[in-house]
Image: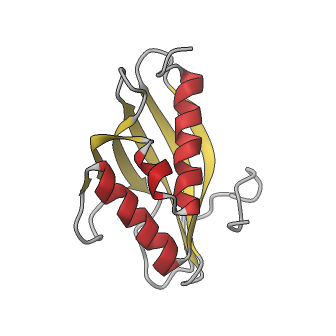
Amino acid sequence: MSKTSPAAIEATIRRYFDACNAADYDALMACFTADAVHYFPPGLPDIPWRGADTIAHKWIWCVENLGSQWTIEKILCSSTTPEAVIEWTHWKRAQNTALRGDEWYVFDEATGRIEEIRAYYAAPADPTARICELVDFDYRGRGYHLSHE
């Protein structure tokens, strides 16, 4: 199996989310190229995150300070390029809030590691909303996670 086959790409994304949830620095580092970049919509400090070390430390900070946990809702992997798109939920348990969004992934063909992530939020990060998500979308009916567990 190629390092960037759809199955390998999905496995890397799932390892990445497991590493995020475990706040596992070494496992996070193993998912990225050294010069990886994680882009975000406006509103967060110090973005984009540049470099595997920065990305790993930022997600560990989120777990330790926000009680962050992430669930994957959907994954689509390209059959022609080393790319994928996913839909996720970021559970911020310390704040009793959640944010839903999508990410576009680009993988290094030689190593199969993530070299770029572009994050898109489902809705603006409204500080008054307990869960930032699409208005009137049937998350329950479509089988989405309704909690971090």
The total number of labels drawn is 0
Quadrant hosting residue 115: top left
Residue lying at 22% horizontally and 67% vertically, measured from the top left: 46
Q: Residue furthest front?
A: 26
- Which of the image's four quarters has the N terminus? top right
- Residue 97 can be seen in this image: yes
Residue lying at 68% horizontally and 58% vertically, measured from the top left: 139
Q: Nearer the viewer, residue 140 or 47?
A: 47
Percent position of residue 119, x then y: 38, 51
Q: Nearer the viewer, residue 124 or 107?
A: 107
Percent position of residue 79, x then y: 51, 17
- Residue 39 can be seen in this image: no
Q: How is the image coloured?
A: secondary structure
Percent position of residue 92, x then y: 54, 74
Residue lying at 28% horizontally and 42% vertically, measured from the top left: 34
Up-down relation of residue 121 to residue 62 (above or below)? above
Q: Is residue 7 left or right of residue 147?
A: left
Quadrant hosting residue 83: top left
Percent position of residue 72, x then y: 61, 50
- Which of the image's four quarters has the C terminus? bottom right
Residue lying at 71% horizontally and 59% vertically, measured from the top left: 145
Q: Is residue 29 left or right of residue 76?
A: left
Q: Nearer the viewer, residue 93 or 111?
A: 111
